Amino acid sequence: MTSAEAQPVTMFPSIDERHQDTRRYPHGVAFMDGQYLPMSEAKISVLDWGFLHSDATYDTVHVWDGRFFRLDKHLERFHRGMAKLRMKIPYTHAEIESILSTCVALSGHQSAYVEMICTRGGSPTFSRDPRQAENRFIAFAVPYGSVANKAQMQRGLHVAISDTVRIPPASVDPGIKNYHWLDLVKGLFDAYDSGAETALIVDTNGNIAEGPGFNVFAVKGQKLKTPAHGVLAGITRQSVFDLCGELGIDVIAGDIDREELKGSDEVFITSTAGGIMPVTKIDDRLVGDGSVGPITKRITDLYWKKHSDPMWSTPIQYK
Ligand code: PLP
């Protein structure tokens, strides 16, 4: 489908499968500049400040068995981020919901990874003044993806703690979901160099912060703890707080140092990309007895049960 053939927001265009380059692009549908497009055609200008300066915010919600999971919470965080960055788009909450839903419906995916993005855009006069930029909204739905693969979900991940410091909250507000990932990517390379599968990086005090795309929880006895400072307030992290409320498990946000994390009975990470994922090895030390623990399993089971609960999920109309 060419841009000239593209339809306005309210229509359901047919996305031409022949234009999907599945070698380079996942199968999916994007929305940008008022049009629905195959993923292979969703491209932005290299002059967009989202690309040039990482001047953007985004959010990611997942779809499981044809239902969005906690979409309202993702939309709220996205709108909060845009407001803090003084970005404006011409779509209401309800219109964004409809666009995301249409991307999923057009893609046909029953389980999807759905991203909404607002970039600063650019100024028509190439002004350096961000107030003159025309902000750009982009959304897309691609197949569901997870931080941990099937084998890692079963046996638990091997995580390395990197000395890399997460960008301080005084520099970039972690409450705004952002693409400032150079610290996280450095942490990942450090982890791979040490033979681990993913990374955790530290905050400015040397305590555990978060990893590339996830928060972390430590379990000691019947109590859970997750880092409080310098981390994204993940929606999955919030879900763990909510689920612990139902299960009668104590959970707090507070500082966790390296030794405390390594001495935990159980550790798990949380992300929209994968949900609740066990960690059974940190650096060269097994967590507990090195197997996935009972509290991690209980919370994981309830988390997936909630995916069909109308209080936690919204159905997609595939038409
Ligand atoms: N921390 C960072 C840096 C992230 O990028 C993400 C998600 O992408 C998370 C934590 C987990 O957040 P959520 O549970 O909302 O997916």
Image (spheres, rainbow, N blue to C red):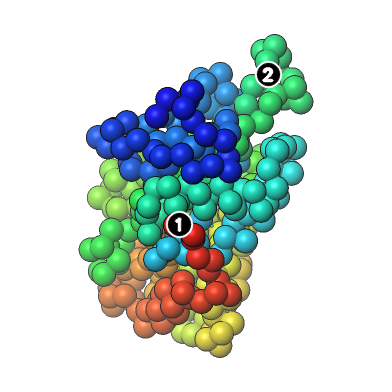
Q: Quadrant of the C terminus?
A: bottom left
Q: Amino acid at mark 1?
A: Lys
143 or 252: nearer the viewer: 143
163 on left or right of 289: right
Residue 248 in view, yes or no: yes
286 on left or right of 31: left
Q: Is residue 64 above or below residue 251?
A: above
58 or 201: nearer the viewer: 58
Q: Is residue 7 above or below residue 296?
A: above
Mark 2 lies on residue = 123
267 or 136: nearer the viewer: 136
Question: Percent from the top left, x then y, of residue 172?
Answer: 65, 41
Q: In the figure, residue 228 lies in which quadrant? A: bottom right
Residue 270 in view, yes or no: no
Q: Residues within 10 Å of mark 1 (few under 14, many from 20)?
A: few
Name the residue at 49% across, 85% down.
222
Going by the picture, which residue comes out furthest to the top? 125
Q: Amino acid at mark 2?
A: Ser
Tag 2's secondary structure?
loop
* Disc 2: residue Cβ within 8 A of ligand 1's nearest atom: no
Name the residue at 70% across, 47% down.
92
Question: Percent from the top left, x then y, of residue 113?
Answer: 43, 52
Question: Percent from the top left, x then y, of residue 100?
Answer: 53, 49
Going by the picture, which residue comes out furthest to the bottom? 248
Q: Quadrant of the N terminus?
A: top left
Name the residue at 31% across, 75% down.
292
Q: Is residue 215 above or below residue 166?
A: below
90 or 312: nearer the viewer: 90
Mark 1 lies on residue = 319
128 on left or right of 188: right
Name the residue at 52% across, 34% down.
7
